[in-house]
Amino acid sequence: MDEDAEGGTQDASLLIDQRIAELDDWRGEMLAHVRALIHKAVPDIAETWKWRGVPVWEKDGIICTGETYKAVVKLTFAKGASVEDPSGLFNASLEGNARRAIDLREGETIDEQAFMVLIRTAAVLNTTRMKAKSRS
């Protein structure tokens, strides 16, 4: 499979499966866990693979990415600055005008319910913006 494949969800899902298996440590477990929560929050979300190896979850646009680094799993929300975060999950990229991120380190847990609310809120934001664009 082409690592730059930005198309089919099935291919992207397989690439994400492979990434999780390759990590073979807490990062793979964390990525698999948040991936499951994303699908639970928005069952019809699409998985894509962009920028030479970044898992991306989309619904009417990018919801978030799942980057893995040596010390963190970074979940970057493309329009995070516009997404209310009453539980304070966003802890990185807070200075930007658009994105917000959640950095998860080894041994940390994520508030699953609050995370799923963020995912749903971001999906609604994308859908609302998509509908607004189509009306103009």
Image (spheres, helix red, strand yellow):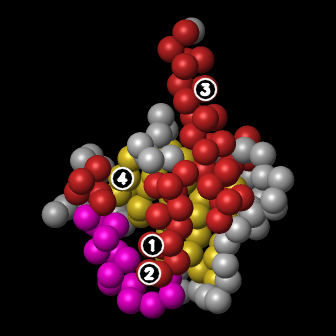
- Residue 84 sits above or below residue 124 on the image: below
Q: How packed is label 2: few (under 14 Cα within 10 Å), some, or many (20 or more)?
A: some
The residue carrying mark 4 is: 48
Q: Cβ–Cβ below 8 Å for labels 1 and 2?
A: yes
Q: Cβ–Cβ below 8 Å for labels 2 and 3?
A: no
Q: Amino acid at mark 3?
A: Thr
Identify the residue at horizontal 61%, vertical 45% (top origin).
120
How far is mark 4 from mark 3, CA to CA? 21 Å
Identify the residue at horizontal 37%, vertical 77% (top origin).
20
Q: Cβ–Cβ below 8 Å for labels 1 and 4?
A: no
Name the secondary structure under disc 1.
Answer: helix
The residue carrying mark 2 is: 28
Name the secondary structure under disc 2.
Answer: helix
Percent x, y of residue 117: 67, 50
Q: Nearer the viewer, residue 92 or 33?
A: 33
The residue carrying mark 1 is: 32
Q: Amino acid at mark 1?
A: Ala
Q: Amino acid at mark 4?
A: Thr
Magenta range = 14-27
The residue carrying mark 3 is: 128
